[in-house]
Amino acid sequence: MQSALLQILATLTLLGCGVRGVDVGQDMRSFSSAIKDGKIGPNTEKVLYEHSTGQPGVITEQWFTGINVMDERMRIRIYIDGEAEASLDFMLLLAHGIGFTETLEKQYTPWGTRRLAHTADGGIYNTYSIPFSKSFHVTATHPVGGYFFYIIRGVENMPVVVGDLVLPANTRLRLFKNEDVKLSPLEFITLANVSDTAGMLFQVTLAANSSDFNYLEACFRARIDDAANITWLSSGTEDFFLSAYYFNRGIYHLDNSGLTYISSSPANAMSAYKFFENDPLLFTKSFELIWRCGETINANSGCPNDWPPPGPSESVNQGGSSPKLADTVVTTYTWVYEYSF
Ligand SMILES: *[C@@H]1O[C@H](CO)[C@@H](O)[C@H](O)[C@H]1NC(C)=O
Ligand SMILES: *[C@@H]1O[C@H](CO)[C@@H](O)[C@H](O)[C@H]1NC(C)=O
Ligand SMILES: *[C@@H]1O[C@H](CO)[C@@H](O)[C@H](O)[C@H]1NC(C)=O
Protein backbone atom coordinates (compact mmCIF):
# COMPACT_ATOMS: atom_id res chain seq x y z
CA MET A 1 0.00 0.00 0.00
CA GLN A 2 2.63 2.46 1.14
CA SER A 3 5.04 1.54 -1.65
CA ALA A 4 2.25 1.97 -4.23
CA LEU A 5 1.65 5.46 -2.88
CA LEU A 6 5.36 6.26 -3.01
CA GLN A 7 5.45 5.01 -6.59
CA ILE A 8 2.57 7.29 -7.56
CA LEU A 9 4.29 10.22 -5.85
CA ALA A 10 7.55 9.42 -7.62
CA THR A 11 5.73 9.25 -10.97
CA LEU A 12 3.99 12.56 -10.32
CA THR A 13 7.35 14.11 -9.43
CA LEU A 14 8.88 12.76 -12.64
CA LEU A 15 6.00 14.21 -14.64
CA GLY A 16 6.61 17.51 -12.93
CA CYS A 17 3.08 17.64 -11.51
CA GLY A 18 2.69 20.24 -8.79
CA VAL A 19 6.36 21.16 -8.96
CA ARG A 20 6.84 24.89 -8.73
CA GLY A 21 9.78 26.54 -10.47
CA VAL A 22 12.75 24.90 -12.16
CA ASP A 23 15.60 22.63 -11.21
CA VAL A 24 18.74 24.36 -10.07
CA GLY A 25 21.47 24.18 -12.72
CA GLN A 26 25.26 23.98 -12.43
CA ASP A 27 25.60 27.09 -14.56
CA MET A 28 23.34 29.21 -12.30
CA ARG A 29 25.40 31.85 -10.51
CA SER A 30 24.23 34.59 -8.16
CA PHE A 31 25.51 38.11 -8.45
CA SER A 32 25.03 40.85 -5.87
CA SER A 33 26.16 44.41 -5.32
CA ALA A 34 25.54 47.26 -2.89
CA ILE A 35 26.26 50.97 -2.45
CA LYS A 36 26.54 52.57 1.00
CA ASP A 37 26.12 56.33 1.38
CA GLY A 38 26.46 56.98 -2.35
CA LYS A 39 25.93 60.46 -3.76
CA ILE A 40 23.78 61.54 -6.68
CA GLY A 41 24.29 65.04 -8.03
CA PRO A 42 21.30 67.12 -9.15
CA ASN A 43 19.93 66.01 -12.54
CA THR A 44 22.85 63.66 -13.07
CA GLU A 45 22.26 60.14 -14.31
CA LYS A 46 24.25 58.03 -11.86
CA VAL A 47 25.17 54.41 -12.65
CA LEU A 48 24.18 52.19 -9.70
CA TYR A 49 25.33 48.87 -11.13
CA GLU A 50 26.60 47.36 -14.36
CA HIS A 51 26.61 43.67 -15.27
CA SER A 52 28.23 42.38 -18.44
CA THR A 53 29.51 38.84 -18.21
CA GLY A 54 27.88 37.91 -21.52
CA GLN A 55 25.68 35.35 -19.72
CA PRO A 56 21.89 35.57 -19.67
CA GLY A 57 20.10 35.89 -16.36
CA VAL A 58 17.54 37.70 -14.23
CA ILE A 59 17.64 40.50 -11.69
CA THR A 60 15.76 39.07 -8.70
CA GLU A 61 15.72 41.89 -6.14
CA GLN A 62 16.39 45.62 -5.90
CA TRP A 63 16.25 47.72 -2.72
CA PHE A 64 16.45 51.52 -2.58
CA THR A 65 17.00 53.91 0.33
CA GLY A 66 18.28 57.45 0.60
CA ILE A 67 18.15 60.86 2.14
CA ASN A 68 15.87 63.33 0.33
CA VAL A 69 15.86 61.24 -2.83
CA MET A 70 13.29 58.48 -2.11
CA ASP A 71 10.43 60.62 -3.32
CA GLU A 72 8.17 60.83 -6.37
CA ARG A 73 10.97 62.50 -8.35
CA MET A 74 13.41 59.55 -8.20
CA ARG A 75 13.80 58.03 -11.67
CA ILE A 76 15.38 54.63 -12.29
CA ARG A 77 16.47 53.36 -15.70
CA ILE A 78 17.48 49.80 -16.57
CA TYR A 79 19.28 49.42 -19.90
CA ILE A 80 19.07 45.83 -21.09
CA ASP A 81 21.62 44.26 -23.48
CA GLY A 82 23.29 47.50 -24.52
CA GLU A 83 20.17 49.54 -25.27
CA ALA A 84 20.81 53.21 -26.07
CA GLU A 85 17.46 54.07 -24.48
CA ALA A 86 16.42 52.21 -21.36
CA SER A 87 13.48 49.89 -22.02
CA LEU A 88 12.66 50.04 -18.31
CA ASP A 89 12.45 53.72 -17.38
CA PHE A 90 10.32 54.39 -14.32
CA MET A 91 9.66 56.62 -11.35
CA LEU A 92 10.68 54.67 -8.25
CA LEU A 93 7.43 55.12 -6.32
CA LEU A 94 5.08 54.32 -9.22
CA ALA A 95 7.09 51.17 -9.98
CA HIS A 96 6.25 50.08 -6.43
CA GLY A 97 2.51 50.71 -6.80
CA ILE A 98 2.68 54.13 -5.12
CA GLY A 99 0.98 57.04 -6.89
CA PHE A 100 1.15 60.71 -5.90
CA THR A 101 3.79 61.68 -3.32
CA GLU A 102 6.05 60.05 -0.73
CA THR A 103 4.67 62.44 1.90
CA LEU A 104 1.09 61.25 1.32
CA GLU A 105 1.90 57.53 1.19
CA LYS A 106 4.37 57.37 4.09
CA GLN A 107 1.59 57.42 6.71
CA TYR A 108 0.77 53.80 5.71
CA THR A 109 4.32 52.42 6.07
CA PRO A 110 5.72 49.94 6.93
CA TRP A 111 4.10 47.41 4.62
CA GLY A 112 5.32 44.56 2.48
CA THR A 113 4.13 41.75 0.25
CA ARG A 114 5.78 38.99 -1.78
CA ARG A 115 6.80 41.34 -4.62
CA LEU A 116 6.82 44.86 -3.12
CA ALA A 117 7.47 46.69 0.12
CA HIS A 118 7.90 50.09 1.70
CA THR A 119 9.48 49.27 5.05
CA ALA A 120 10.96 52.55 6.36
CA ASP A 121 11.89 56.06 5.21
CA GLY A 122 13.33 54.62 2.03
CA GLY A 123 13.31 50.83 2.40
CA ILE A 124 11.53 50.50 -0.92
CA TYR A 125 12.15 47.15 -2.58
CA ASN A 126 10.80 44.75 -5.16
CA THR A 127 11.44 41.19 -6.25
CA TYR A 128 10.42 41.64 -9.89
CA SER A 129 12.26 39.19 -12.18
CA ILE A 130 13.94 41.29 -14.86
CA PRO A 131 15.57 39.15 -17.56
CA PHE A 132 18.56 40.07 -19.77
CA SER A 133 20.45 38.05 -22.33
CA LYS A 134 24.00 39.44 -22.05
CA SER A 135 24.26 42.56 -19.95
CA PHE A 136 22.43 45.44 -18.27
CA HIS A 137 23.10 48.56 -16.24
CA VAL A 138 20.94 50.47 -13.76
CA THR A 139 20.96 54.24 -13.24
CA ALA A 140 19.27 56.73 -10.90
CA THR A 141 18.42 60.37 -11.59
CA HIS A 142 16.97 62.95 -9.20
CA PRO A 143 16.43 66.68 -9.82
CA VAL A 144 17.90 67.70 -6.47
CA GLY A 145 20.16 64.78 -5.64
CA GLY A 146 21.35 63.52 -2.28
CA TYR A 147 22.65 60.39 -0.58
CA PHE A 148 21.44 56.90 -1.31
CA PHE A 149 21.88 53.23 -0.49
CA TYR A 150 21.26 50.41 -2.97
CA ILE A 151 21.22 46.61 -3.19
CA ILE A 152 20.78 44.54 -6.34
CA ARG A 153 20.87 40.78 -6.72
CA GLY A 154 20.22 38.32 -9.49
CA VAL A 155 21.09 34.94 -10.93
CA GLU A 156 22.77 34.08 -14.23
CA ASN A 157 21.30 31.31 -16.37
CA MET A 158 18.05 31.23 -14.43
CA PRO A 159 14.72 31.60 -16.28
CA VAL A 160 11.90 33.94 -15.31
CA VAL A 161 9.33 32.07 -13.23
CA VAL A 162 5.99 33.80 -12.74
CA GLY A 163 3.70 31.88 -10.43
CA ASP A 164 3.72 28.31 -11.72
CA LEU A 165 4.88 29.24 -15.22
CA VAL A 166 8.47 29.10 -16.45
CA LEU A 167 8.75 31.66 -19.23
CA PRO A 168 10.82 31.16 -22.43
CA ALA A 169 14.51 32.12 -22.52
CA ASN A 170 13.78 35.07 -24.83
CA THR A 171 11.43 36.73 -22.28
CA ARG A 172 11.68 40.51 -21.84
CA LEU A 173 9.89 42.71 -19.31
CA ARG A 174 8.27 45.81 -20.80
CA LEU A 175 6.69 48.80 -19.11
CA PHE A 176 3.80 50.80 -20.62
CA LYS A 177 3.11 54.19 -19.05
CA ASN A 178 0.49 56.93 -19.03
CA GLU A 179 1.47 59.97 -17.00
CA ASP A 180 -1.12 62.50 -15.74
CA VAL A 181 -3.52 61.95 -18.64
CA LYS A 182 -6.74 63.97 -18.34
CA LEU A 183 -9.83 61.96 -19.33
CA SER A 184 -13.33 63.27 -19.97
CA PRO A 185 -16.32 61.29 -18.71
CA LEU A 186 -16.57 57.88 -20.46
CA GLU A 187 -13.32 58.40 -22.37
CA PHE A 188 -11.18 55.27 -22.86
CA ILE A 189 -7.48 54.98 -22.12
CA THR A 190 -5.13 52.24 -23.33
CA LEU A 191 -2.85 50.99 -20.57
CA ALA A 192 -0.85 48.58 -22.74
CA ASN A 193 -0.88 47.81 -26.45
CA VAL A 194 1.25 44.87 -27.54
CA SER A 195 1.28 43.41 -31.03
CA ASP A 196 3.12 40.62 -32.90
CA THR A 197 4.31 38.82 -29.80
CA ALA A 198 3.18 36.39 -27.14
CA GLY A 199 3.33 37.29 -23.48
CA MET A 200 1.68 37.69 -20.13
CA LEU A 201 0.50 40.62 -18.08
CA PHE A 202 2.53 40.93 -14.87
CA GLN A 203 1.42 44.02 -12.93
CA VAL A 204 -0.88 47.05 -13.25
CA THR A 205 -0.67 50.23 -11.15
CA LEU A 206 -3.29 52.95 -11.52
CA ALA A 207 -3.46 56.30 -9.72
CA ALA A 208 -6.46 58.54 -10.40
CA ASN A 209 -7.87 61.81 -9.08
CA SER A 210 -11.13 63.61 -9.80
CA SER A 211 -13.75 65.85 -8.21
CA ASP A 212 -15.94 62.71 -8.08
CA PHE A 213 -15.16 59.06 -7.20
CA ASN A 214 -17.62 57.72 -9.76
CA TYR A 215 -14.77 57.04 -12.19
CA LEU A 216 -14.31 53.87 -10.11
CA GLU A 217 -17.34 52.42 -11.95
CA ALA A 218 -15.07 51.70 -14.94
CA CYS A 219 -14.69 48.04 -15.87
CA PHE A 220 -11.25 46.97 -17.10
CA ARG A 221 -11.35 45.28 -20.50
CA ALA A 222 -8.77 43.63 -22.73
CA ARG A 223 -8.46 42.59 -26.33
CA ILE A 224 -6.56 39.32 -26.34
CA ASP A 225 -5.23 38.03 -29.70
CA ASP A 226 -8.30 39.44 -31.43
CA ALA A 227 -8.75 43.16 -31.97
CA ALA A 228 -12.49 42.64 -32.52
CA ASN A 229 -13.27 40.93 -29.25
CA ILE A 230 -13.52 42.40 -25.75
CA THR A 231 -12.56 40.26 -22.76
CA TRP A 232 -14.02 41.69 -19.54
CA LEU A 233 -11.49 41.78 -16.72
CA SER A 234 -13.51 43.43 -13.97
CA SER A 235 -16.88 44.76 -12.88
CA GLY A 236 -15.41 48.03 -11.64
CA THR A 237 -12.07 49.67 -10.88
CA GLU A 238 -11.78 48.74 -7.20
CA ASP A 239 -13.01 45.24 -8.17
CA PHE A 240 -10.07 44.89 -10.57
CA PHE A 241 -7.82 45.58 -7.58
CA LEU A 242 -9.76 42.88 -5.67
CA SER A 243 -11.40 45.32 -3.25
CA ALA A 244 -15.10 46.32 -3.37
CA TYR A 245 -17.54 49.16 -2.78
CA TYR A 246 -15.17 52.00 -3.65
CA PHE A 247 -12.44 50.55 -1.38
CA ASN A 248 -14.73 51.04 1.64
CA ARG A 249 -12.32 49.28 4.05
CA GLY A 250 -9.42 51.50 3.09
CA ILE A 251 -5.73 50.72 2.55
CA TYR A 252 -4.62 47.08 2.11
CA HIS A 253 -1.43 45.37 0.98
CA LEU A 254 -1.70 41.80 -0.30
CA ASP A 255 0.37 39.59 -2.60
CA ASN A 256 -2.27 39.76 -5.34
CA SER A 257 -3.23 43.43 -5.05
CA GLY A 258 -3.14 46.49 -2.84
CA LEU A 259 -4.35 50.02 -2.28
CA THR A 260 -1.48 52.38 -1.43
CA TYR A 261 -3.45 55.62 -1.13
CA ILE A 262 -7.04 56.81 -0.90
CA SER A 263 -8.48 60.20 -0.03
CA SER A 264 -11.74 62.01 -0.65
CA SER A 265 -10.43 65.46 0.25
CA PRO A 266 -9.55 67.85 -1.36
CA ALA A 267 -10.50 65.57 -4.29
CA ASN A 268 -11.11 61.86 -4.87
CA ALA A 269 -7.75 60.19 -5.28
CA MET A 270 -6.68 56.53 -5.17
CA SER A 271 -3.63 54.52 -6.09
CA ALA A 272 -3.66 50.71 -6.38
CA TYR A 273 -1.71 47.78 -7.82
CA LYS A 274 -2.61 44.28 -9.02
CA PHE A 275 -0.30 41.36 -9.82
CA PHE A 276 -1.25 38.63 -12.28
CA GLU A 277 1.31 36.16 -10.94
CA ASN A 278 -1.31 33.82 -9.42
CA ASP A 279 -3.86 34.66 -12.06
CA PRO A 280 -2.11 34.41 -15.44
CA LEU A 281 -3.42 36.62 -18.23
CA LEU A 282 -1.73 35.17 -21.30
CA PHE A 283 -1.75 36.14 -24.97
CA THR A 284 -0.16 34.58 -28.03
CA LYS A 285 -0.38 37.38 -30.66
CA SER A 286 -1.55 40.69 -29.27
CA PHE A 287 -2.86 42.34 -26.14
CA GLU A 288 -4.62 45.63 -25.37
CA LEU A 289 -5.53 46.65 -21.84
CA ILE A 290 -8.15 49.38 -21.57
CA TRP A 291 -9.68 51.46 -18.75
CA ARG A 292 -12.31 54.15 -18.90
CA CYS A 293 -13.32 57.29 -17.01
CA GLY A 294 -16.54 55.87 -15.53
CA GLU A 295 -18.80 53.32 -17.22
CA THR A 296 -22.03 52.62 -19.03
CA ILE A 297 -23.93 49.38 -18.63
CA ASN A 298 -24.85 47.18 -21.59
CA ALA A 299 -24.78 50.01 -24.12
CA ASN A 300 -22.40 49.66 -27.06
CA SER A 301 -19.00 49.01 -25.51
CA GLY A 302 -20.43 49.27 -21.99
CA CYS A 303 -19.91 46.77 -19.21
CA PRO A 304 -22.35 43.80 -19.24
CA ASN A 305 -24.83 43.35 -16.39
CA ASP A 306 -25.66 39.76 -17.24
CA TRP A 307 -24.31 36.58 -18.82
CA PRO A 308 -24.18 36.18 -21.72
CA PRO A 309 -23.46 39.83 -22.47
CA PRO A 310 -25.67 41.40 -25.14
CA GLY A 311 -24.06 41.56 -28.61
CA PRO A 312 -23.75 44.93 -30.33
CA SER A 313 -26.99 44.46 -32.28
CA GLU A 314 -29.08 43.56 -29.23
CA SER A 315 -27.69 46.30 -27.03
CA VAL A 316 -30.22 47.59 -24.59
CA ASN A 317 -30.22 50.77 -22.63
CA GLN A 318 -28.22 52.76 -25.21
CA GLY A 319 -26.18 55.39 -23.48
CA GLY A 320 -26.26 53.18 -20.45
CA SER A 321 -27.03 54.12 -16.90
CA SER A 322 -24.12 56.23 -15.89
CA PRO A 323 -23.54 58.03 -12.60
CA LYS A 324 -22.48 61.66 -12.57
CA LEU A 325 -18.93 61.76 -13.90
CA ALA A 326 -16.18 64.36 -13.92
CA ASP A 327 -12.84 64.78 -15.67
CA THR A 328 -10.25 62.48 -14.14
CA VAL A 329 -6.46 62.65 -14.18
CA VAL A 330 -4.89 59.22 -14.39
CA THR A 331 -1.39 57.73 -14.27
CA THR A 332 -0.82 54.06 -15.09
CA TYR A 333 2.15 51.68 -15.14
CA THR A 334 1.59 48.31 -16.83
CA TRP A 335 4.31 45.64 -16.74
CA VAL A 336 4.12 42.94 -19.40
CA TYR A 337 6.41 39.96 -20.06
CA GLU A 338 6.84 39.45 -23.80
CA TYR A 339 8.25 36.31 -25.40
CA SER A 340 8.04 34.14 -28.50
CA PHE A 341 7.71 30.37 -28.68
C1 LIG B 1 -2.96 49.47 -30.55
O1 LIG B 1 -1.99 49.69 -31.55
C2 LIG B 1 -2.49 49.41 -32.85
C3 LIG B 1 -1.33 49.47 -33.82
O2 LIG B 1 -0.59 50.64 -33.64
C4 LIG B 1 -3.60 50.40 -33.18
O3 LIG B 1 -4.15 50.12 -34.45
C5 LIG B 1 -4.71 50.25 -32.10
O4 LIG B 1 -5.71 51.21 -32.32
C6 LIG B 1 -4.14 50.39 -30.71
N1 LIG B 1 -5.17 50.05 -29.77
C7 LIG B 1 -5.54 50.82 -28.77
C8 LIG B 1 -6.65 50.32 -27.92
O5 LIG B 1 -5.00 51.89 -28.53
C1 LIG C 1 -15.31 36.64 -29.75
O1 LIG C 1 -14.86 35.46 -29.11
C2 LIG C 1 -15.88 34.50 -28.92
C3 LIG C 1 -15.33 33.39 -28.08
O2 LIG C 1 -14.09 32.92 -28.59
C4 LIG C 1 -16.39 34.02 -30.28
O3 LIG C 1 -17.45 33.11 -30.11
C5 LIG C 1 -16.90 35.23 -31.07
O4 LIG C 1 -17.25 34.86 -32.37
C6 LIG C 1 -15.82 36.32 -31.14
N1 LIG C 1 -16.41 37.51 -31.73
C7 LIG C 1 -15.83 38.17 -32.73
C8 LIG C 1 -16.52 39.42 -33.16
O5 LIG C 1 -14.80 37.78 -33.26
C1 LIG D 1 -6.29 65.78 -6.62
O1 LIG D 1 -6.68 66.96 -7.28
C2 LIG D 1 -6.97 68.06 -6.40
C3 LIG D 1 -7.57 69.16 -7.23
O2 LIG D 1 -6.75 69.47 -8.31
C4 LIG D 1 -5.69 68.47 -5.70
O3 LIG D 1 -5.95 69.53 -4.80
C5 LIG D 1 -5.18 67.26 -4.92
O4 LIG D 1 -3.94 67.57 -4.34
C6 LIG D 1 -5.03 66.04 -5.82
N1 LIG D 1 -4.72 64.88 -5.00
C7 LIG D 1 -3.59 64.20 -5.10
C8 LIG D 1 -3.43 63.04 -4.17
O5 LIG D 1 -2.72 64.48 -5.91
Image: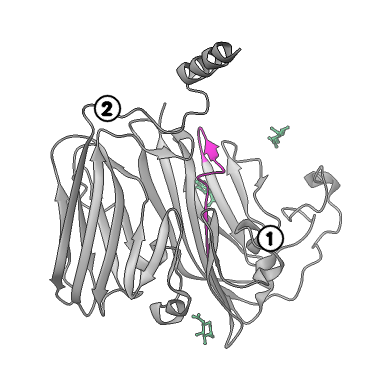
In the rendered view, does 199 fall on the left or right side of 249?
left
Label 2 vs 1, first from the N-terminus: 2
- Residue at 86% x, 54% y is 316
Of residue 194 and residue 300, the one placed in the foreground of this image is 194
Q: Is mark 2 within 8 Å of ligand 1?
A: no
Which numbered dot is residue 257?
Answer: none
In the rendered view, does 274 fall on the left or right side of 133?
right
Q: Is residue 76 above or below residue 315?
A: below
**Residue 5 among magenta residues:** no
Q: Pinpoint residue 64: horizontal percent, then vertical percent.
A: 28, 65
| Residue 77 visible in the current orientation | yes
Of residue 95 and residue 311, the one placed in the foreground of this image is 95
C-beta proximity under 8 Å, tags 2 and 1: no
| Residue 329 visible in the current orientation | no
Q: Is residue 91 above or below residue 114?
A: below
- Residue at 78% x, 59% y is 297
Query: Residue 1 falls in which quadrant of the image?
Result: top right
Residue linked to disc 2: 25
In the rendered view, does 210 fall on the left or right side of 217?
left
Q: Is mark 1 within 8 Å of ligand 1?
A: no
Q: Is residue 14 above or below residue 99?
A: above
Of residue 273 and residue 297, the one placed in the foreground of this image is 273
Q: Pinpoint residue 123: horizontal percent, then vertical percent.
A: 32, 68
Circle nearer the viewer, 2 or 1: 2
Of residue 66 and residue 71, the one placed in the foreground of this image is 66
Q: Pinpoint residue 286: horizontal percent, then vertical percent.
A: 51, 38
Query: Residue 103 falls in which quadrant of the image?
Result: bottom left
Give, as a single range, the part of the protein colored magenta.
272-286
Which numbered dot is residue 236?
Answer: 1
For the residue marked with disc 2, what is the amino acid?
Gly
